[in-house]
Image: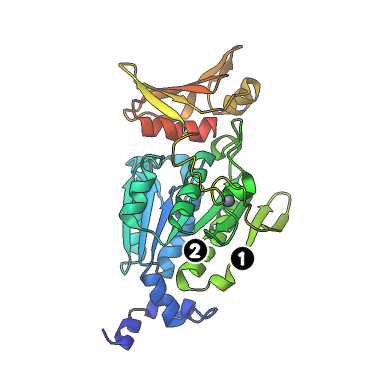
Amino acid sequence: MPENARDLNFDRYHRQMLVGGIGASGQRRLAASTGIVVGCGALGCASTDLLARAGVGRIVLVDRDVVELTNLQRQCLFDERDVAEQSPKAHAAAARLAAINSQIVVEAVATDVTHRTIEPLMERFRPDVILDGTDNFQTRFLLNDAAIKRGVPLVYAGVLAGSGMQMTVRPGITPCLRCIFDGPPTTAVPTCDTAGVLGPAVAIAAANQAIEGIKLLAGLEDRLSGVLLQFDLLANTHRLLKVGSRRADCACCGRREFEFLAGKNADTAAVLCGRNAVQIWAAERGVDLEEMHRRLAPLGSFARSPVLVRGVLREARGEGGEPIELTVFADGRTLVRGTASIERARGLHARFVGG
Ligand SMILES: [Zn+2]
């Protein structure tokens, strides 16, 4: 194909190619790239919207959930029809992105990303960058392991309430998530479903995530931020923290012990036969029942006993429309009643119990 004919296809990217030395060569690099986005919630929607419009040639969307009404406040690729149809998020987002940009390839995978599924996904799609759109630390550290093991950059972002963070991990060059945070919290932590989240906080974190992805894919590595961004829109703080250098004793990027890929810290989930219920063991995580009760009480009819917190969630339903009952035990075990789907139960657990 003649060079200029190829560039003609780039008309729609004209304003972007004028900026920061992207030009036709950067645009061609974007068009030849694959980005995988794990989690199509608020962050995944907002950052892939930007990547699709920017012309990233192949975008792979992975998510285990379906669209719900309370998603629409911040998850910008979905609408009320997706809620009515209970569309899988990965497919609803892919349809929207394909309508935005027909020049790119968008693939949807409705699955749970676990230590069993992550490596086959990486092998199948061979991404040039991984975008973190997850809602829990377990999956986030799993992505960190996969990124370091395969030498693929990971663009991390996270939001909660009015605050957010963003950091880019370049294997062998920058610290990884475990250099900075060591590992997931040892107790259950608040989530967007219990502590809430603001759309503008999502937009800021996702915009930073998307531009870091674009820099990596367009050959503008020298423009990467090199910092851990932390902001709080209600406290009006915006900090850029130096990430320092890699830790030689880091289990992941130092010793290359990929504990999360090995499933060492994985939650175990099992369907309870004949009971339309799934039991989830959150490994090595105890639960403060008083705190858990305080968090869940606004979300349904939750009561606390000395050994557990139990109640029915007001807004969630099982596959057949059944009410969802959560029973959280002090030892870290949770019983999700109203579904026989492990993926659905894991999703509900990550959202409401936290981890
Ligand atoms: Zn590390």
Q: Residue furthest left?
A: 1
Q: Is 58 situated left or right of 135 in this image? A: left
For mark 2, what is the residue? 213
User: Which amino acid, by three-letter code, is at mark 2?
Assistant: Gly
At a point 37% along the width and 47% down the height, the residue shown is 119
Q: Position of residue 107 (x, y in %)?
A: 31, 55
Q: Residue 311 or 33: which is nearer the viewer?
A: 33
Task: Looking at the image, tell me whether mark 2 or mark 1 is earlier in sequence order.
Answer: 2
- Judging from the image, what secondary structure is the residue with disc 1 in? loop
User: Which amino acid, by three-letter code, is at mark 1?
Assistant: Ser
Residue 174 visible from this viewpoint: yes
Q: Position of residue 315 (x, y in %)?
A: 46, 31
For mark 1, what is the residue? 225
Label disc, if present, on residue 9 of the rendered structure: none
At a point 45% along the width and 25% down the height, the residue shown is 280
Kindly indicate the quadrant of the structure image that contains residue 304: top right
Q: Is 2 situated left or right of 238 in this image? A: left
In this view, 324 is above or below 119: above
Q: Residue furthest top?
A: 306
